Amino acid sequence: MKRILKTFLCLIMLLSITAGGWAASGNNKKQPSRPISIVLKPSNPNAMRPRTPSMQEITCAYMDSYIYFGFAIPEGECEMVLSDLNTGEIVTATFDSEDCEPIYVGEIESAEVTLTTENGHTYYGEW
């Protein structure tokens, strides 16, 4: 029950980011950037082998220099590698897939992100 509640809260947070972002109050505060949201795809080394569709869906949202991940099914500790496609800069981080903590990655216009999970799965996406 606790995991379901935590997953539900993570999904609500991701939906609020992608539905319009956060509103900045006051005239002297920087307006938030447009949120970016993608669904990460599994890298499939055995593409020729027939498989049952997975229930796993990993949502990746980027806004105001932070990246957020939402897992339909937690997969333990994850290692993220984010490559800025404009500058070539690489950011790495380790996090638990059950938590919805934001990861600071800095200002990025376009990037490629790869996640490797404790369960041995790899996912990727780009914006």
Image: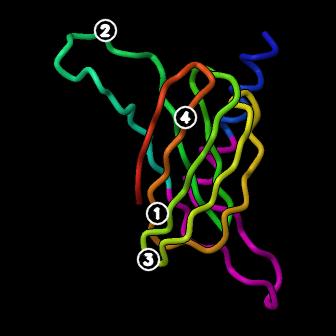
According to the image, label 3 marks what residue? 86
Viewer-side label of 1, 4: 4
According to the image, label 1 marks what residue? 111
Q: Residue at x 27, y 10 (%)?
A: 51
- Kind of residue at disc 4: Thr
According to the image, label 2 marks what residue? 52
Q: On the image, which quarter does residue 116 sit in?
A: top right
- Kind of residue at disc 3: Asn
Residue span colored magenta: 13-36
Q: Calculate the distance from the C-alpha at mark 3 to the C-alpha at mark 1.
A: 8 Å
Asked if the residue at tag 4 contacts the one at tag 2, i.e. Cβ–Cβ closer than 8 Å, the answer is no
Q: Residue furthest left?
A: 48
Q: Earlier in the sequence, mark 1 or mark 4?
A: 1
Within 10 Å of the Cα at label 4, are there few (<14), some (14-19), or many (20+) other Cα atoms?
some
Q: Residue at x 62, y 63 (%)?
A: 63
Q: Position of residue 120 (x, y in %)?
A: 53, 22
Q: Position of residue 73 (x, y in %)?
A: 59, 19
According to the image, label 4 marks what residue? 116
